[in-house]
Amino acid sequence: MQLHVADHPLIRHKVTVLRDKNTKSPTFRLLVDELVTLLAYEATRQVRVAEREVETPLTSTVGTVIADPPPIIVPILRAGLGMLDGMTRLLPSAEVGFLGLKRDEETLEAVTYANRLPEDLTGRQVFLIDPMLATGGSLIMAIDYVLERGATDVTCVCLLAAPEGIENVRVAVGERADVSVVVAQVDERLNEQGYIVPGLGDAGDRLYGVIGD
């Protein structure tokens, strides 16, 4: 597994505002969208391309286009939806799948409640998006889902990560596939409840508000 921390002044600035507990949901959503666009630029450095001849107003030339089959972006519901526009802005030709996972607050393990993915992902580059890489449970389950369907090239895009979650993903992936994790910042640790510290709280709640069971 490869880890890339996108260290840039604009990224650090936006993360700081996201952390502020006084940042309201509309501003939080806007900042996440902007931040993901910056992260997507880093995450797509190895996107597969092909050459194509085009006619300019003056002559013909050979350019570069996103190769077929197109990549697939998979937001991990629900918080991952807040990152989707930022990714598709840079990859408008990508297809979108959905994977619904939630954390059992007692066991801290991920539980699947929705799955909308192609059965065959052979030859597809997959971009998994989820704001928080905490324990790594949700991301590991999502990686397993796409690997079981034939994917071998997976990039995970997260806003924040805890060292424990990064290590858990590294161990779980092993040598099975080419997996990269792109994050804005790596935080200090997890607390007893499995939340990232200093973190920014529950990303889903801050994006969309608190929804009761």
Image (cartoon, rainbow, N blue to C red):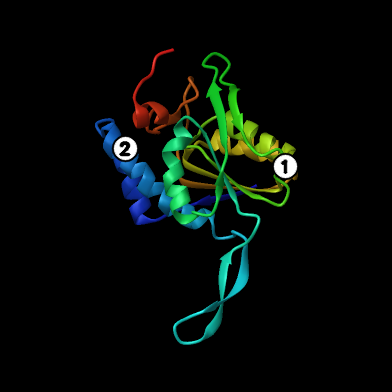
Classify 179 as above or below 90. above
* Structural distance between the alpha carbons of marks 2 and 1: 35 Å
The picture places residue 157, in percent across and down from the top left corner, at: 52, 45
Amino acid at pointer 1: Asp
Tell me if residue 188 can be seen: no
Nearer-N-terminus badge (2/1): 2
Residue 28 is marked as 2
* Residue for point 58% across, 30% down: 138
The picture places residue 127, in percent across and down from the top left corner, at: 57, 46
Amino acid at pointer 2: Phe
Residue 50: quadrant of the picture: bottom right
Counting every numbered tag in the picture gives 2
User: Of 124 and 193, which appears nearest the observer?
Assistant: 124
User: Of 136 and 32, which appears nearest the observer?
Assistant: 32
Asked which secondary structure carries label 2, the reply is helix
Residue 82: quadrant of the picture: top left
User: Of 171 and 91, which appears nearest the observer?
Assistant: 91
Classify 31 as above or below 111. below
User: Of 67 and 189, which appears nearest the observer?
Assistant: 67
Reading the image, the residue beneath label 1 is 120
Classify 93 as above or below 147. below
* Residue for point 72% across, 39% down: 149
* Residue for point 27% across, 39% down: 27
Left or right position of 17 against 58: left
Mark 1 crowdedness (10 Å alpha carbons): few <14, some 14-19, many ≥20: few
The picture places residue 62, in percent across and down from the top left corner, at: 58, 78
Q: Contact, CB < 8 Å: mark 2 with mark 1?
A: no
Mark 2 crowdedness (10 Å alpha carbons): few <14, some 14-19, many ≥20: many
* Residue for point 47% across, 29% down: 78
Tell me if residue 43 can be seen: yes
Instruction: Give the quadrant of the C terminus.
Output: top left
